[in-house]
């Protein structure tokens, strides 16, 4: 989950920066179809959800310890 969270954070933050200079990731071009405000909300949500997944998911070591305990 940490890798998926980091991917969401990178895509969201990169989309923020690229949108400011007039570009966009081709994968995320659909974001602005509903309007500029909704696009910014989706970008922000990607960063927040990605950060949540990255920081609150257990690390590899903790997951292995939990599996060994069961």
Image (spheres, grey):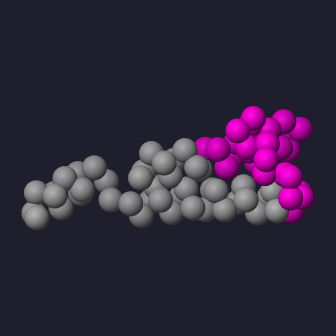
Q: Specify whether 28 is left or right of 10.
A: right
Residue appearing at x 61%, y 44% in the figure: 10
Residue appearing at x 79%, y 38% in the figure: 24
| Residue 17 spot, x, y in % from top left | 77, 43
| Residue 46 spot, x, y in % from top left | 64, 56
The number of discs equals 0
| Residue 67 spot, x, y in % from top left | 16, 58
- Quadrant of the frame with the C terminus: bottom left
Residue appearing at x 79%, y 47% in the figure: 30
Verify whether residue 11 appears in magenta.
Answer: yes
State the residue in front, 42 or 34.
Answer: 34
Residue appearing at x 58%, y 49% in the figure: 8
Compared to 17, does 40 lie above or below? below
Magenta: predominant secondary structure element? helix
Q: Specify whether 63 is left or right of 69.
A: right
Magenta residues span: 10-37
Q: Quadrant of residue 65?
A: bottom left
Verify whether residue 13 appears in magenta.
Answer: yes
State the residue in front, 28 or 11.
Answer: 28
Q: Specify whether 64 is left or right of 36.
A: left
Compared to 16, does 51 lie above or below? below
């Amino acid at each position: 989950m940490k890798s998926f969270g980091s991917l969401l954070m990178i895509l969201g933050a990169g989309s923020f920066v690229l949108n400011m200079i007039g570009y966009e990731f081709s994968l995320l071009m659909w974001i602005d179809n509903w309007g500029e405000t909704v696009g910014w909300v989706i970008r922000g949500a990607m960063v927040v959800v990605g950060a949540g997944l990255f920081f609150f998911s257990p690390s590899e070591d903790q997951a292995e310890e939990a599996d060994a305990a069961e």
